[in-house]
Amino acid sequence: MDTNSMVIQQLINGISLGSIYALIALGYTMVYGIVKLINFAHGDILMVGAYVGFFVLSAFGTSPFGFFVAIIISMVVCALFAIVIERFAYRPLRNAPRLNSLITAIAMSLIIQNAARVIPFIGPNPRQFPTLAKSTVYIGSFSLSNIQLIVIALSAILMLILAYIIKFTKIGKALRAVSFDNKAASLMGISVNKTISFTFALGAALAAVGGVLYATAYPQITPTMGAAPGLKAFIAAVLGGIGSIPGAMIGGYILGLAETLAKGFISSQFANAISFAILIIILLVKPTGLMGKNEREKV
């Protein structure tokens, strides 16, 4: 394979991985945009989605229909799970100092991981994720698998649906209003609590899809599997501008491309280091991220 073909192949791999990071990063950025909380338990929602997908695919088989059912059920389960977490863990601390909420988010992450390890039907041992039958299309000297195609296409469709919900629906307008000024939104008759719960549910549903797609692309699941992609998605959200939905998408793709190009042309051992180096550089050069805006905090 010549250099040009290798670059194209790595770009395809990067877009596939970046699509997953972008889906997860959207949950981080939406929650931060509306309640100024970095939800470090978000990566563990991905893990829950992957396990739900595992059980559904084990029951329905790895047909396209089974994969579709796994996606839908994991989205519903994770959305409901996120609503419960928001109601009982985060809502009581909404007016507390941000550090309290941050510590609670880290605690929730550890609780979810360790609860999964002791639940009998999950357990601490890795499991092989049932995946679709893999087929590969060769275009010239590079290849595109059906799994990569599904990841890229499904992620793009979900991002377009999210953009439509936020820009053109009533709940989307309420979400933007609460994000801008929740007190004014409340005075205008918008239910702030319901809007925030919807934001958590929407972000968790996207993370659930990300979890199933991630497990399909890398077919081994463990209770701690959400830590690495969750952290990478957080870097993607910061890179794009935490609180910016287009920024989260762009940040996800940039990080995915950087990681796969590093693996392909430098060394797989440096991939994580390069991801964190990107985070450090963007914080030094443009702390608000690529599409973030400077905000003044009232004291």
Image (tube, rainbow, N blue to C red):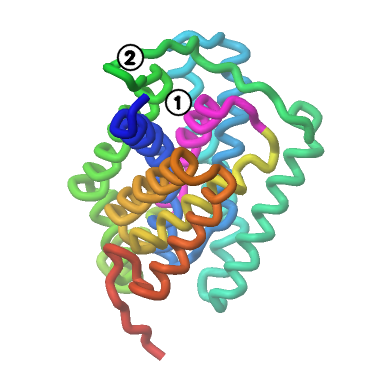
- Specify the quadrant of the image occupied by residue 101: bottom right
Tell me which residue sits at (34%, 66%) in the image.
289
Q: Nearer the viewer, residue 33 or 239?
A: 239
Q: Which residue is mark 2?
A: 138
Q: Nearer the viewer, residue 135 or 68?
A: 135
Tell me which residue sits at (62%, 14%) in the image.
58
Q: Amino acid at mark 2?
A: Tyr
Secondary structure of the residue carrying tag 1 is helix
Is residue 206 visible in the rendered image? The answer is no
Secondary structure of the residue carrying tag 2 is strand
Residue 235 in percent (x, y) is at 46, 57
Q: Quadrant of the N terminus?
A: top left
Within 10 Å of disc 1 (Cα), the crowding (few <14, some 14-19, many 20+) is some
- Specify the quadrant of the image occupied by residue 268: top right
Which segment is the magenta one?
197-221
Is residue 259 visible in the rendered image? The answer is yes
- Left or right? Give the position of 1 relative to 45: left
